[in-house]
Image (cartoon, helix red, strand yellow):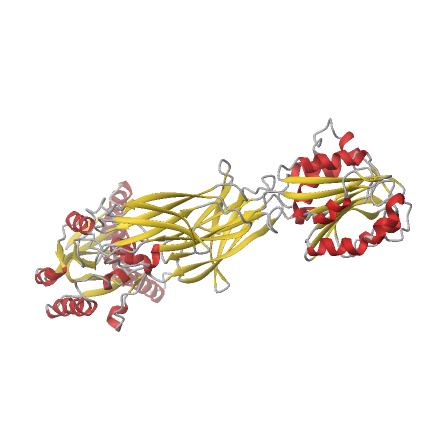
Amino acid sequence: MQFTYLNSGHLFWILILLFGILLFHLYRNIFHYIEIKKIILFRLLSFSILIFLILDPRFIFHISKKQDLSWNLYIDKSLSMAYHSKPSLGSLISGIDQIINKINEKKINSTIFRFGTDLDTNWIYGEKKFLDGSTNLGIVMDHIKYKGDTKSAGSIIITDGQANLGREIPLENLDQYKPIHIIGVGNIVPFVDVAIQSIDAPPVIIKGDNAEIIVSITCNGDIDQKLNITLSSDEKLLGSKVISASANGSLDKVRFMVTPDQTGKMEYRLKVNAIADEVNILNNRQNFSIQVLKDIYRIAIITGVPNFNTQFLKNIINDNAKVEFDHFVYRSNGYSNSLKNFWDTKYDLIIFDNHPIMNNAEEWQSYLRIFAKKILSQKTSLVLFPGYDIEKEVFESYLKLMDLNYKESIINIGDEYKWSLTKDWESFFPFIDTKIINNISNNQPPIYTNLDIDPVNSQVLANFSISEMDVPLLLISEKSPLRFGVWTSPDLNKLYYKNQNGDSSSILNTLFRPVFSWLIRTGEEKNFYFRVGKNSYQQGERITVIGKPINHSEISKEGYIHIYKNDSLINSKQLYFDNEKGIYTGNFWASKSGILNYEIELFNKKNSIIVSRGEVRVQESQIELNNIFLNKFRLQKLADLTNGSFRYWDERLSLVNNINPEIEKTMVNYNIVLKENKWLIIFLILVITIDWILRKRYGIL
C-alpha cells in the first residue's frame, strides 16, 4: 500500500500557517472556557479535515489476480474439407471430436468456432457438416485480432488453407498475435481439375461480321496431357483447338473466330474434354449466346410528286450504311421503277413521300387491301410524309391502317407555327444528346401544317402550339407486329435550310435517325444488348456482365446492375462504359446459389431506364472443388510468424499434447481518492452538524 498526495502548493502552506496562528490564539485566550471547549474541538477537527483534503490525498493498493486463459479452436466447414482422399469425411469428424476431447481431458478452457463464408459456434450443437461454398480465413484472422486474442492463450485452426473469399492469408504484421497453431488437412498435391473460367465474346454483332471468342481455361493439379477445346452451334462443330495443359492454377487462352450467316440469337457451346481423376466436370462446358442483327435493311420510297422533301429523305436514309432503298416515283406513264418489284420485294420500311396524289389516288385506293396484307405478312413498318399535293381522302385511308384519323379542327391550321418536342420524346429516346434536343425544342423555325390528326392510339413526339392548343407534328404508333409514323408538315426541307448555319444543322438526322431506327427495328426490339459471360457460375465466383449499345448516339456512361434473388434485391453494382471498345462491363459475386435475376439500369441527366433483364444460374458450392489440396506454404508461414506450429492431420494429437493450461497473472491497482470517498464526506458532514448543534445549545449561533 502507498500513500501519496497530488497538491502541496502555496495555498496549502498559507492555510497551515493561518491554522497554526488560530490554534495558538485559541490556546492562549479561549480554550480555558470549558463551556465552548467541545465546540472548538469539533471546529478544529472539521478545519483539519478540509485542509487535509486540499492535498488531494490517496491510498494505492496493489493486488495480484490470476485468470485461466482459454484456447480458440477454429474448424473449416467448407466443402473442400470433405473431398480430400485422406482423411475421409467420417475420419475428419471423429478426429476433430478427438482433439476436443483431449483438450477437455487436460482441463483446458476452449471455445469452438466454425468458419466458411461466415463464423459460428454450431459445432458444439451437433452441426458437423462441411457444406459451405467458400472459405474466408480473413474473418478468422479478424476475430483473433479484435475479439478472440484478448483473453486467450492462443488459437488452433483446422483447415486446408484454400481461402477463396475475403482477404488472403496475411503474412505481415503478425507479431501482435498470440501463437496460432495449424492442423493441415489433405494432401499437398492438388486434385486434378480443368475449368472454363471465362468467355470473352461480343453480346451483339452484325450479320457477316467476324466475332472473336476468347476462352480462358484454368488447370489445377498435376496435368500432363493434351486438352481439346471445341466450339459448336446447333450440334454443328465450328472449331476445335488442342493445347498442352499447364498445371498448378495456370491460365491458358484459346481463340476462335466465327462469322454467323443467320440473324437472331445464336447459341454456342464450349466444351473441354474431361481428364482422368478430374474432381469436377460440371465446369468443363459452358453455353453462351451472341445476338446477330441484320446487315442490310431495305426501304421503299414511293413519291407521288417530287418535292423539296424528297432529297432530304434520301439523305437521311443514305446516312445509314446498313440501309438500301428502292425509289418509286410516279410518272404519267407509270413509275420510275416497276411496281412489280415493289410487290415482290420484302421491305423493312415503306415511306410515302407526298403520296398518294390526285393522279394516282384511285389506283392506290384499289391497292389498299393488298398493301395491308403485304405489310402485315412481311412485318413492314410504314411512315407517311404528306406534301402539298396529297389527295387527303385516300391519304386518310392509309392513316386508318395505323388506327389514326383526321380530327375536325376547331382552329385555323393552314399557316406556319412554332413547334417543340414533347415529353414522350425523352421517354422513347432517353439517351439522345440532350443539348441537341434542347436546341431542337427551343430554337426551331415555324413550319407549315394543314393536317390535324387525332393522336388517340399513338404517341406524339412533337407538337405545334396553336392558340394554346397542341396539334400533332410527329406521331408514332405500334400495332403488333407493325410500327407506324406520321410527319404532318409538308415543310420538312425548311428545317435544313433554316438551320444549316446554326448548331443544329444536323437536325434532320438528329430527329429522324432514331425514329427510322425504331421503325426498321435495327436492334431487333432493343437499343442495348447485355448478357453474362457464361450460362452458369459457381457459388463464390465473380460474375461478369457485358453489354453493347446498338446506336452509338444513344450512350449513357452511368449505370448499375441490380441483382435479385426470389424478387428481393440483394446487391447493386456499378456499370462502366469503355469508350475504346464501345462496351459496358460490370461484375458482382455469385453469393447465393440458384437462379439470380439481374436488371441493367442506365441514367441520363433526368431519367433512368431499365434497358435489359436477364438471369444467371449459380451452382451450389462447386468452386470449392477446384482447389482441393493442402495450402501448406501459407499455413506454415502463418504458424511460424506467430510463434505457433504446423502439424499434418496425422500429427494432430502431438499438438494437443504440447498444449497445457495457461494462467495469466495480472496486477490490479486500486486507487482510493479520499476527497471522493463518501464515508469521509459523511464524517465531515457529521462533525459540522455536531458543531452546529452544540453552538445552538450554548446560544452562540
Query: Can residue 411 be seen from the camera position used here?
Result: yes
Left or right position of 562 against 380: left
Q: Is residue 503 above or below residue 31?
A: above
* Residue at image point 73% right, 26% down: 501
| Outermost residue toward the bottom in this view | 126
* Nearer the observer, 53 or 509: 509
* Residue at image point 21% right, 50% down: 222
Q: Is residue 526 above or below residue 82?
A: above
Residue 181 % position (x, y): 16, 56
Left or right position of 79 against 645: right
Q: Is residue 195 above or below residue 121?
A: above
Residue 612 % position (x, y): 55, 53
Query: Can residue 78 be seen from the camera position used here?
Result: no
Left or right position of 434 against 567: right
Could you tell me which quadrant the N terminus lies in? bottom left
- Residue 664 falls in image quadrant: bottom left
Residue 457 % position (x, y): 76, 57
Q: Is residue 694 above or below residue 534?
A: below
- Residue 60 falls in image quadrant: bottom left
* Nearer the observer, 60 or 266: 266
* Nearer the observer, 334 or 373: 334
- Residue 105 falls in image quadrant: bottom left
* Nearer the observer, 108 or 373: 373
The tally of labels here is: 0
Residue 81 % position (x, y): 23, 61
Could you tell me which quadrant the C terminus lies in? bottom left
